[in-house]
Image (cartoon, rainbow, N blue to C red):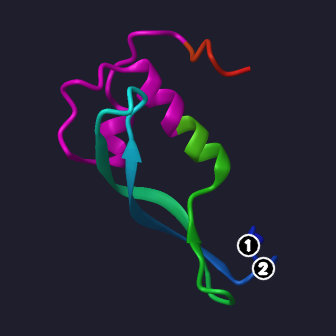
Amino acid sequence: MQCEWCQSNDTTQTTKEAYWELPDGLKAIQIHNIPSIHCQSCGMNYIEEALVEEIEDHLFLIHTQDLPNSIGYDALMSKPRTLKKNYFRM
């Protein structure tokens, strides 16, 4: 896999944590163990854009009022959706 920042092929799959603002903008949560890419050449550890969109869509489609301040990626993504898709994404 090629690094999106420096185009090096010296990358490994890893995980990271990140803070994510909920769609209503009233709260941010910490998400642990998000699949990510770490580049040995430039040192970047980033979440691929497709996964960022997947997380954002999922947060749009679930009840976020009951989410704890901190949650694991797998636990978040296993929350049942109340809508079929994000109708705001074109």
Magenta region, residue range: 55-84
Q: Residues within 10 Å of mark 2 (few under 14, many from 20)?
A: few
Residue 5 to residue 60: above or below: below
What number is the disc on residue 90?
none
Return the residue at label 2: 6
Decide if residue 37 is on the left or right side of residue 31: right
Structural crowding at the residue carrying mark 1, measured as other residues with C-alpha within 10 Å and reported as few (<14), some (14–19) or many (≥20): many
Name the kind of residue labelled 1 in the image. Cys
Mark 1 or mark 2, whichever is nearer to me: 2
- Decide: is 2 above or below 90: below
**Residue designated by label 1:** 3
- List x then y, in percent, for residue 71: 25, 46
- Asked if marks 1 and 2 touch (Cβ < 8 Å), the reply is yes
Residue at the outermost bottom position: 41
Relative to 51, is 76 on the left or the right? left
* SS for callout 1: loop
The residue under the point 32% across, 27% down is 79
Residue 87 to residue 90: above or below: above
In the image, what residue occupies the spot 53% across and 63% down? 36
* Residue drawn where x is 68% and y is 90% of the image: 41
Which amino acid lies under the numbered mark 2 shown in the image of this protein? Cys
